[in-house]
Image (cartoon, coloured by chain):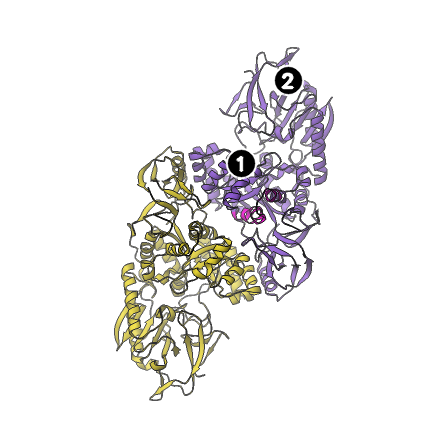
Chain colours: A purple, B yellow
């Protein structure tokens, strides 16, 4: 959405505020939670165009909404998320989150950027133009994530400057994930900092799990001002003391609210905001979004005013979105009416003055088709079982996976053997894992072993594979692995579970191999069936596809795999399968 | 000053932060008050170039400062002031306030703008280039203040846009003083709002004494986000509830801290910051600046952390100065070392990494001469006693002045008469008052009566006369009035006290008729002698020149005077002297 800021809009807004013209909408009889004092104010809210014009008694409107018994909050803001994790295109994402009160999201679209570059980001913004949701972009800074990854596009410092300069909704640079390089003063990293400065948008998100001491000072000295990777109170406290904004993350896999809320209780909500980072579509639909994080915070003893501040005004302030985050004159009319400050289940939601959700259902969200060029991005030769055969003599390296962790262990073991081949061994929880390049149809593949998924038969394959989003497949049967990969090529990407060369379940994601073009409920249902199918195949970890998606991320310790082979991510070098 | 932000600066900063290079300066052994948690941290502060690089233990530096027993605070920020009120040019102003810990000021230079337009503002910024003080400008929005004032230059909406677009230190639009016009949606006012938006700097200071209810909503709806005119708790609370930043003002005349501090005690320091608006040079030298306001707040029971927040980080956040307001890596190295959190008398002050004051004395502040064209701006024909003769028959309007108020009362009385003339009558505290146009040498003058100064003999004259800064003279003797005005023309403006056609005291302000070119101590001394002289002449109000300076401000009720005559500022029209 764009903002209504012409002189005519302004004149109308003032006339409504003065009471000289009827408001376009008045929400009457409710109470507004002031983001500036924490008080509940018994006032009407008069809306003119896309903005709140007046907050006070006795406004009249062309349309009036009776909010008796309700509390009005500003629309919720997700301070950092990857929309691609929801597998929903912008319109369906909006339809999913607006009923929960989310009216603004700040995205790092680095999944789509790894497939299509900044053209992919632009396509998301173009889609957002027609949808009642404010989508702001922190421009992805690490595309590709490393030289070991074969992705679809590269984003250079000059691209960042140009994009920031021309796109008003691009507000800064996304998480500087390669924090060791930033700390080390690596020229390519500094070039990205300077790219933001040149565009007049020196606003840098961080990503620095465990960074502390002098390294932390260096990261901050570079201009980074936030972190969403804190997992302990002590870590968050050290970072906050030095001015870092603590993004308290509550996603599908990483959930840090319980660990970090004591910081808010001890020092207040200052310099804290909420985010989800990665949230799956089924969780989004069933549990909620930022409202769910606020609800949990309050349930854990956070004062509701403080929880709401972190999910609204403070997120807006951190991101310098000066018209967002409060129900007050001159702010955009993003409003959430809730019956209480405990459950945060909105009765009604308005986006820029228009009602967009009521009683949990979105209202009139237009369908927006993704452009055709975003389809057909999974380019692969047809594979056979033979492609997954491993012929090595000695002991092999194995990626050791622990449930709920994206960090892996570098293991070494003697594989099972059959007909001179090293094969999967379900009894010892030893599966094969492979990544196949899919952007340029090279068919280049890395092949190895993984332990920890628990797979007993079949194969699981996905084009959600951070950050290059090549094809990731884990299986105990070579023919099933080939069938799963071939099926992904057919449906244009997504997720698939195969056994006996039959597809058991699938989540088609034809948009860049990352996002669905189907309604949110359908996608959430497919994700749930996929989860069930993977467990049927023996997978015993909670979110096998989420875990798989991080096995190719070559910047996370210790051992990962890309289309170029196994990567020792501690020494940052390719290593052979044979140990 | 400009910021050091080249890639080389950045690389050096990171190397210092990591401990790989010695810092340019390390402040060791002190405690830093974290602006983000309120804790006192026992850490070293490592400075690289103009920025803080590292905050933590065990940094080494080329230069080291032993801060044992001291507490380090961020440099203080005055969120709103008119530098011209200090009568000091930028260099001497810096020399006066740096020892008090002020390292950044946000000025509305509307006095100089009324004389020279935005060229005058540019001259102040050019002077600031060579001085260790960050001077940011909110571009004056009301030049001239009204059509009844004959000033030296006009600032149009297009001028504002151009200035904001080209000058990085111009950060927004200064106090929208004509708040009734803004509320009414007057096109010229809205054009100024849109000028800021067009430049991408929609950041608007307010000035709205007593504005409330729907008018307040309208003012905020226009985009105004601050007010420094609150005088009561209730007024400030209403404004803060709706998102207005409350600038708590503690100037020479208007002192609002005591009335407003309860708001901070009740709701915390959020959305509050400190400013001085107008502070006289003697007060600045003797009592202090923002440190003085912080000290008073603490003495009144405000927690020191909250008081410092309002004088540093929150002022920076309101003004979107993202590298100011904290002692933390990546922030500019504006540091104040104090022995305690009670007196706020700095032991040492650093500006962008360089020590600029120690034990109350400024260190190495270069002299910066104002350009010649800023002199000789008081252009007048030579006046005689005859010019001040009043010949009217009936009752006359009288400007009724109350001590400490800039609002006046519109009185009517029968004047004393002598030789067919209406004359001053000291016994009834009735003096003459006149404003003479001085920018274009028209000699046009308004003439009338004033009550409340208490003047018993002689005349007081000044070129500090808001906002047009014509010559303002109050006297009980026509010849003395002429002599005072003529003396001002000779010295290029300032203030003068005359009796028996002899100059008793004067404060020459040859720069635009507003600012001195002399050292701060000399100016402060002259101001004190001037105060004494005016009391010698019988003036019984505390700050007669300050009060005089508002008698020509045609936007303040009820009756004022300009070179065009008496102005009924309620009905906003010229009125005759005869009632």
Q: Residue B100 got which mark?
A: none
Looking at the rendered structure, the secondary structure element under dot 2 is: helix
On screen, residue A225 above or below B146: above
Viewer can see residue A353 = yes
Q: Position of residue A257 (x, y in %)?
A: 57, 39
| A36 and B370: which is toward the camera | A36
Q: Main secondary structure of the magenta part?
A: helix
On screen, residue A550 above or below B401: above
Write down the region rendered in magenta.
A295-317
Circle 1 is placed at which residue position? A229
Q: Quadrant of residue A428?
A: top right
Q: Quadrant of the C terminus of chain A?
A: top right
Left or right of A37 on screen, residue B289: left
Whole-angstrom CA distance, mark 1 to mark 2, is: 33 Å
Left or right of B118 on screen, residue A166: right
| B377 and B246: which is toward the camera | B246
Left or right of A458 on screen, residue B115: left
Q: Position of residue B348 (x, y in %)?
A: 32, 47
Q: Position of residue B370 (x, y in %)?
A: 32, 59
Magenta-span inclusion, residue A407: no
Lower position in the chain sequence, tag 1 or tag 2 = 1
Chain identifier of the residue bearing label 1 in the image:
A
Chain identifier of the residue bearing label 2 in the image:
A
Q: Quadrant of residue B54?
A: top left
Circle 2 is placed at which residue position? A428
Viewer can see residue A87 = no
């Amino acid at each position: 959405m764009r903002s209504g800021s012409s002189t005519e809009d302004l004149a109308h807004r003032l006339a409504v505020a003065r009471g000289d013209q009827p408001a376009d909408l008045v929400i009457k009889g409710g109470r507004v939670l002031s983001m500036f004092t924490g008080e509940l104010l018994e006032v009407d809210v008069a809306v003119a165009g896309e903005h709140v014009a007046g907050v006070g008694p006795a406004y009249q409107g062309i349309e009036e909404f009776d909010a008796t018994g309700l509390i009005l909050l500003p629309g919720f803001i997700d301070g950092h998320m990857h929309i691609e994790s929801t597998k929903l295109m912008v319109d369906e994402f909006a339809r999913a989150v607006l009923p929960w009160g989310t009216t603004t999201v700040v995205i790092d679209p680095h999944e789509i950027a790894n497939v299509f570059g900044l053209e992919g980001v632009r396509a998301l913004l173009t889609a957002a133009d027609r949808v009642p949701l404010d989508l702001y972009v922190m421009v992805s800074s690490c595309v590709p994530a490393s030289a070991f990854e074969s992705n679809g596009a590269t984003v250079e410092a000059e691209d960042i400057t140009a994009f920031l300069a021309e796109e008003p909704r691009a507000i800064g640079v996304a998480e500087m994930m390669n924090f060791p390089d930033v700390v080390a003063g690596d020229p390519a990293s500094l070039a990205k900092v300077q790219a933001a400065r040149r565009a007049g948008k020196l606003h840098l998100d961080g990503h620095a799990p465990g960074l502390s001491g002098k390294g932390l000072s260096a990261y901050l000295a570079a201009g980074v001002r936030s972190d969403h990777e804190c997992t302990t109170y002590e870590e968050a406290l050290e970072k906050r003391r030095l001015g870092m904004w603590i993004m308290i993350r509550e996603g599908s896999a990483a959930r840090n609210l319980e660990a970090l809320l004591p910081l808010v209780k001890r020092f207040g909500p200052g310099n804290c905001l909420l985010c989800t980072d990665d949230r799956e579509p089924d969780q989004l639909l069933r549990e909620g979004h930022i409202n769910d994080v606020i609800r949990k915070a309050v349930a854990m003893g956070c004062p509701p005013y403080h929880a709401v501040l972190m999910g609204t005004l403070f997120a807006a302030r951190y991101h310098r979105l000066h018209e967002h985050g409060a129900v007050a004159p001159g702010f955009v009319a993003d409003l959430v009416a809730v019956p209480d400050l405990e459950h945060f289940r909105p009765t009604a939601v308005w986006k820029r003055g228009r009602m967009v959700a009521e009683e949990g259902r979105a209202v009139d969200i237009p369908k927006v088709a993704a452009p055709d060029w975003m389809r057909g991005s999974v380019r692969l030769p047809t594979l056979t079982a033979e492609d997954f055969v491993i012929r090595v003599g000695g002991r092999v390296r194995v990626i050791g996976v622990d449930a709920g962790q994206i960090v892996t262990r570098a293991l070494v073991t003697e594989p099972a053997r059959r007909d001179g081949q090293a094969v999967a061994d379900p009894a010892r929880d030893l599966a094969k894992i492979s990544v196949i390049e899919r952007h340029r149809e090279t068919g280049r593949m890395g092949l190895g072993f993984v332990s920890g998924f628990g797979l007993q038969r079949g194969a699981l394959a996905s084009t959600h594979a951070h950050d290059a989003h090549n094809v990731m497949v884990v299986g105990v049967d070579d023919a099933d692995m080939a069938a799963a990969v071939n099926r992904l090529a057919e449906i244009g990407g997504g997720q698939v579970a195969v056994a006996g060369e039959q597809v058991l379940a699938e989540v088609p994601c034809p948009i860049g191999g990352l996002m669905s073009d189907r309604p949110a409920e359908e996608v959430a249902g497919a994700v749930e069936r996929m989860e069930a199918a993977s467990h049927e195949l023996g997978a015993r970890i909670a979110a096998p596809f989420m875990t798989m998606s991080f096995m190719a991320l070559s910047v996370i310790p210790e051992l990962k795999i890309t289309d170029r082979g196994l990567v020792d991510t501690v020494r940052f070098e390719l290593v052979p399968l044979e140990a």
